[in-house]
Image: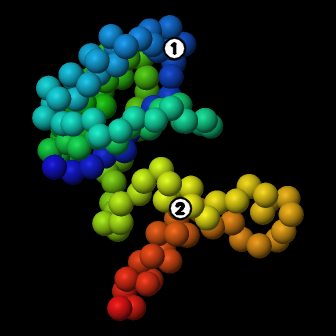
Amino acid sequence: MATYLMFGKYSVEGLKGISAKRSDEAKALIKKHGGELKAAYAVLGSTDLVMVVDLPDVARAMATSTALAKLTGIAFTTSPATGSGIPITPASATAGCSMSALSTSNAPIRCPADLIASSLRQTNQK
């Protein structure tokens, strides 16, 4: 199984249909395509929804993305996740990020990509 990130953008119709029933139908559809929903997050910005899904292959990822769009009215961009093998948890994803650094200093803000890179350097040096 490979991990895919599904980035969703709601349409007007998609917003009208938000319900627990539709969420259950979406989970069942992912399972029907041989996959498993690992996590889903509502987010702010140009993307409204991010889902982490395990699926057997690219063909099923494409089929799942299309079928979910048809079911939900959410336009999905689906990308394979290529990881470092370092687990990202909510706590580690925000560790080192400081909004106050934006207004009080010129120091670089350390966010997830920086943390992953520094973790990899430490691992590779051992």
Q: Is residue 52 left or right of residue 102?
A: left
Which SS class for mark 1?
A: helix
Dot label at residue 30: none
Which SS class for mark 2?
A: helix
The residue depicted at 44 percent of the width and 9 percent of the height is 17
Q: Are marks 1 and 2 in contact (CB under 8 Å)?
A: no
Work out which residue is located at the far right of the displayed protein and give it.
104
Q: Is residue 98 depicted above or below 108 in this figure?
A: above
Of residue 62 and residue 86, the one placed in the foreground of this image is 86
Of residue 109 and residue 29, the one placed in the foreground of this image is 109
Q: Amino acid at mark 1?
A: Leu
The residue depicted at 46 percent of the width and 35 percent of the height is 41
Of residue 14 and residue 105, the one placed in the foreground of this image is 105
Is the C terminus in the top left, top right, bottom left or bottom right quadrant? bottom left
Q: Quadrant of residue 119?
A: bottom left
Confirm whether residue 62 shows in the render. no
Provide the residue designation for mark 1.
15
Q: Amino acid at mark 2?
A: Pro
The residue depicted at 50 percent of the width and 8 percent of the height is 16
Q: Is residue 121 depicted above or below 126 in this figure?
A: above
Dot label at residue 112: 2
Residue 34 appears at what percent x and percent y? 13, 35
Residue 31 appears at what percent x and percent y? 17, 29
Q: CA distance from mark 1 to mark 2?
A: 30 Å
Q: Which mark sits nearer the N-terminus, 1 or 2? A: 1
